[in-house]
Each structure stands twice: as structure tokens, then as C-alpha cells.
Amino acid sequence: MIEPAKPVIWIIDSQHWPRANLRAELIERGFEAVGYINPAHALAAFRYPLIKKPHLIVLELCDLILVRHELEAMVRIGVPIILLGGVTELNQKLIRDFQWAAILQRPFTIGAVADAVEKLIRG
């Protein structure tokens, strides 16, 4: 019997352990989770036809150098984007220039992020 394809979630987070822990939680919940260090790496992967395209992107703003053309390119992919950040990061003008599927402000738990992913993917 062939298993149905799992929804692909891209996690963009410069911090290894938070990215790895969220990835593990999403895998446990039945998603195919792929981690990237920054938007440039994720966008480079998007260009390769063998890379599975995401159904949703989780973008952590902590330690991220924001570049407008990278955010625009991610939005053009056409999938929901969950934004994670603190007050200062979330109040940057560049961030407010875009529409996000969900925004989680620190403090939040890995479970809360995974719940937001499930809600957006599975309704």
C-alpha cells in the first residue's frame, strides 16, 4: 500500500537546536519537515526540481538579516508563512509590509508552533 504524501514544511531558523526540535515535533505529527539556516538557502533549494516544494514555511526572525527581495521571493512561492519573533523583530517596517498566515510572538513553545502549522495545513 502506498502512503499518501506528507505535507512538506520548511523551517527557516539560524539556530540549530530550535530548528531541530521543531523539525522533530513536526515529523512526529506526520509532516515532512526540512530545515534551512536562512531564506537564501531555502530559496536556492526551491530552484532545484527534485526538491519537494513546501506546503507551508515557518520563518524565525531571531538573528536573521532581513532582505526585502528574499521576503518577496518567499511570498511569491504562494504558501502560508508563519512568522516567529520577538517584539522588536516583529515591529520592523519591512515585516509589516507583508501579509503573514500567522504570527507567533515570543515567548512561545515548540508545541504552539506545531499547533499553528497543523491548523493552517489541516484546518
Image: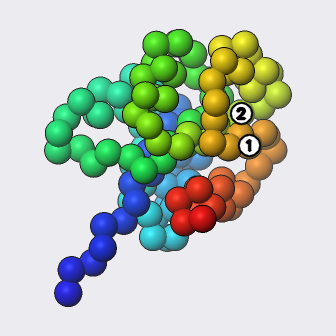
Mark 1 element type = strand
Q: Nearer the viewer, residue 56 or 32?
A: 56
Give x and y (percent) for residue 18. Answer: 59, 46
Locate the C terminus and report the quarter of the image it occupies: bottom right
Residue 38 seen from this side: no
Q: Residue at x 75, y 26 (%)?
A: 90
Residue closest to the far bottom: 1
Task: State the residue in front, 52 or 23.
Answer: 52
Q: Nearer the viewer, residue 78 or 54?
A: 78
Q: Decide: marks 2, 1 in contact (CB < 8 A)?
A: yes
Q: Residues within 10 Å of mark 2 (few under 14, many from 20)?
A: some
**Residue highlighted by disc 1:** 104
Please name whichever residue, 38 or 18, is drawn nearer the observer in this view of the structure: 38
Query: Label 1 sits on what residue type?
Result: Leu
Q: Could you tell me residue 26's position as x and y percent? A: 51, 61
Q: Amino acid at mark 2?
A: Gly
Residue labelled with disc 2: 85
Q: Is residue 99 left or right of residue 72?
A: right
